[in-house]
Amino acid sequence: MEIVHISAECYPVAKAGGLGDVVGALPKYQCKAGHIAKVVMPMYRTKFLYNNEWVVDFKGSAHLGDWLFEYTIIREKTNSLGFDLYLVDINGLLDREKIYGYDDDTERFTAFQIAVVSWMASWEHRPDIVHCHDHQSGLVPFMMKHCFNYRHLSRVSTVFTIHNGQYQGWMDWSQSKLIPAWDDWKTGLLEWAGRINPMASAIKCADRVTTVSQSYMEELFYDANGLESLFDYERGKCVGILNGIDNEIWNPATDTYLDNHFSVKTVTKGKKANKALLCEKYGLDKEKPLFVFIGRLVGEKAAEILPGSIARAIHESGGAASFLILGSGQTDIEWALQQMTGQYPGLYNAYIGYNEALSHLIYAGADFLLMPSRVEPCGLNQMYAMRYGTVPVVRSTGGLKDTVVDMGDPDGYGIRFNHATESDLVYSISRGVSVYQDSAHMEKMRKFMMQVDNSWEATVQKYISVYQGIL
Ligand code: ADP
């Protein structure tokens, strides 16, 4: 099968969150399973671009409204990621340092999608599956099926994966001129609640819609940022498939970011060495159980309850635990977390920013990972934590519910709670502090969770079955 993945992110080329991890791994494991999977993404100015060799695969031009723009498709020369990687260069529009966050993101990602579809329409053959990821490629199924220019692609099967349903890429009707001409009577396929909604359009037009966990799929029927009734209507084509993790990258025995490697057998010693390094770097007491948070500092992750919860947990436990935060996001939350750094010497520190290397050391050195998320479509952090023997402390939602078993249940290895509130989080931290005193129990949980199979090898076949169902 030939599968073309279209995405705004792909690790290690460009990553802002879980989408990048998934698009960096799923195609690799599809290729390993004997298929031809390719990734097409925008050409940002990233380290990966400058550190690798590229060949020009195609040059073309297309219209974004009145503007005739030129684009170039370049391909990474050595197949170093385990799949063919194509970047779309649109001068002045995509070749920037950040992935998102510009005023003209709508124009940027619309032009990207037009370039990709125009390029695929020029191929002599047709791919079997075009697999789009999140709203930045949400207009592709509509364009392939209903825009006059791309009729050649109208019979190609499309799959749309929702990694995060909160962001839908809304556009005003004044921006409809950016989209290549279509049959007027199909306009409803672009629309939701009076606006152009690329995510809704993809749900309507793709042959199958997947989300990254079964529980998140079920949540979307009653909580989908306005799209609930659409999900309900399209229920028949929706499938929940839990993400895997790339066990080659996320392996504490070989992780290139770590100096102290460890395996299931050596977990206690290995984590101790990583914790010592981490605590020394961030001025924390290494004798105390270390609770960490890694992620975007936004409401979805309930990050705003962290400062209050940590302060309460420190006071109520008499300083029995230490805390380290790695994240960036809303400035008010960043500020609140930052200004606490001087207040609890030896017990609290924060790194505000994005730091891939530090995240690996934290997964390896921490005792507990906090994830009080309000919305968590799948969540990868808890799976990385498990692989590194770090106990996940999670709210029971979405993928967290599907991957973490509470330590009070048979074969449990995590801590679960129901509400994204300070009280629930502080109580869960106190459960962590108690279990930390029982080193035999901790070791047993660590060894057990490190062996839970969350690999892509186990998951990839589920996507293949979805593809087979529509071919
Ligand atoms: P989301 O995609 O909603 O942000 P996920 O749990 O699916 O959340 O994926 C988050 C990914 O991003 C993980 O690989 C996590 O380690 C990484 N990550 C998030 N914030 C940071 C940060 N500040 N520094 C390094 N890695 C981060």
Image (cartoon, rainbow, N blue to C red):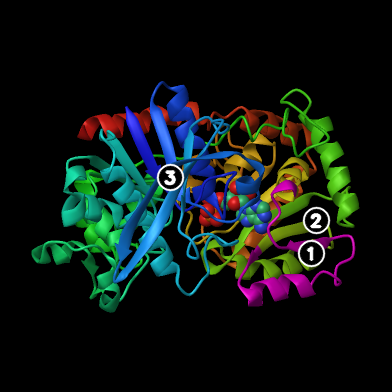
Please give the label number shown on residue 128: none
Q: Which residue carries the number 3 mark?
A: 40
Element assignment for label 2: loop
Q: Quadrant of the C terminus?
A: top left
Residue wearing tag 1: 314
Label 1, label 3: how many angstroms apart (C-alpha)? 47 Å
Q: Contact, CB < 8 Å: mark 3 with mark 2?
A: no
First in residue order: circle 1 vs circle 2? 1
Residue at screen point 52% across, 48% down:
20
Q: Amino acid at mark 1?
A: Ile
Q: Which residues are magenta?
A: 328-357
Q: Is residue 356 magenta?
A: yes
Answer whether labels 1 and 2 touch (C-beta < 8 Å).
yes
Queried on whether the Cβ of the residue with tag 3 lies below 8 angstroms from ligand 1, the answer reads: no
Q: Earlier in the sequence, mark 1 or mark 3?
A: 3
Residue 85 drawn at (x, y percent) = 48, 39
Q: Which residue is mark 2?
A: 321
Q: CA distance from mark 1 to mark 2?
A: 7 Å
Between 181 and 24, the one nearer to me in the picture = 181
Identify the secondary structure beneath mark 1. Answer: helix
Compared across the picture, whether 228 is left or right of 134 comes to: left
From the viewer's perspective, tell me whether residue 433 is left or right of residue 101.
right
Q: Secondary structure at mark 3?
A: strand
Image quarter in which the N terminus is found: top left
